[in-house]
Image (spheres, rainbow, N blue to C red):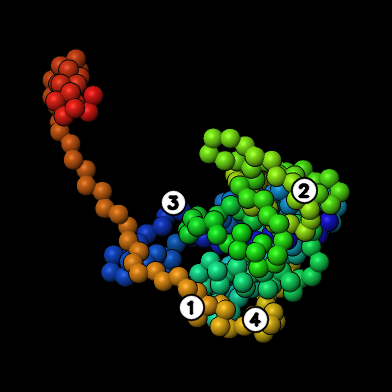
Amino acid sequence: MNIIVCIKQVPDTSEVRIDPETNTIVREGVPSIINPFDENAIEEALLLREQHGGKVTVISMGPPQAEAALRESLAMGADEAILVSDRCFAASDTLATSYVLSTAIRAIGEYDLIFCGKQAFDGDTAQVPPGIAEQLGIPQITFTIGLEVDGRKVRGRRMLESEFEVVEVRMPALVSVVKQINEPRRPGIKAKLAAKKKEVTIWDSACMDIEPCLCGLDGSPTRVVRTFAPTREIKGEKFEGEPAECAAAVIDRLIGQKII
């Protein structure tokens, strides 16, 4: 079974900051990690390989530093890693990103399954996995919390807001996963050292027969007008006295404001 996993390197969400002057995300000096949902996608691919054999190829579109995320994937157990990187890909929105990744997947060759995390932590759109499936013309199962493979059929259990849904499709197919599907393995020092010695293939636009007008800013119909961090104005009132008196005063105030 040939499995491809699409991952993204994102800023560590606990340390994301917005530049108040430019209203853009500050990336300098901020550590980057594999998008957490993508770790679950890698893990699910590795579990299927252990059950059915085959190969797991991890691919990422990003700047040169995204190679670190691919090496982490190799440390987890992926067989091959491909970095799709070119200056003409900069400023790609979800449509252009889907085009570039789907073109890279075609260049890889035959595959049975494509795994993605349900969404990226920095963008939160969940649009790229369906976009890849649409570009490739293959069926997709999104928000997957459980997966079964039976011959050439894939049965996925989808997590919805108030219920579950079971969808069955034929391979090749794309599956995007939620965090509840598994617990990603954590590679040890030995695996990380071995991953540093492995080759990460780097493809630019010339390697994949990319049409420049369909990627980067030219191929992105989305226009970001402004990005900003919301301000929090904390208003409150301090009550002093015995606990019972303070509690009674709070209740009276809430009743007076018709909150309770």
Q: Is residue 35 left or right of residue 242?
A: right
- Write the residue at 80% across / 46% down: 149
Q: Residues within 10 Å of mark 2 (few under 14, many from 20)?
A: many
Q: Hey, which residue is sitting farthest top in the picture?
A: 244
| Numbered badge on residue 217 | 1
- Write the residue at 58% across / 57% down: 34
Figure quadrant of residue 64: bottom right
| Numbered badge on residue 154 | 2
Residue type of the residue flagged with mark 2: Val
For marks 2 and 4, the one nearer the N-term is 2
Q: Nearer the viewer, mark 3 or mark 1?
A: 1
For marks 3 and 1, the one nearer the N-term is 3
Residue type of the residue flagged with mark 4: Ile
| Label 4: which secondary element | loop
How far apart are the alpha carbons under marks 2 and 4?
A: 31 Å
Q: Is residue 45 left or right of residue 1?
A: left
How far apart are the alpha carbons under marks 3 and 1?
A: 28 Å
Mark 4, residue position: 210
Q: Nearer the viewer, mark 3 or mark 2?
A: 2
How far apart are the alpha carbons under marks 3 and 2?
A: 35 Å
Residue 249, image x, y percentages: 14, 21
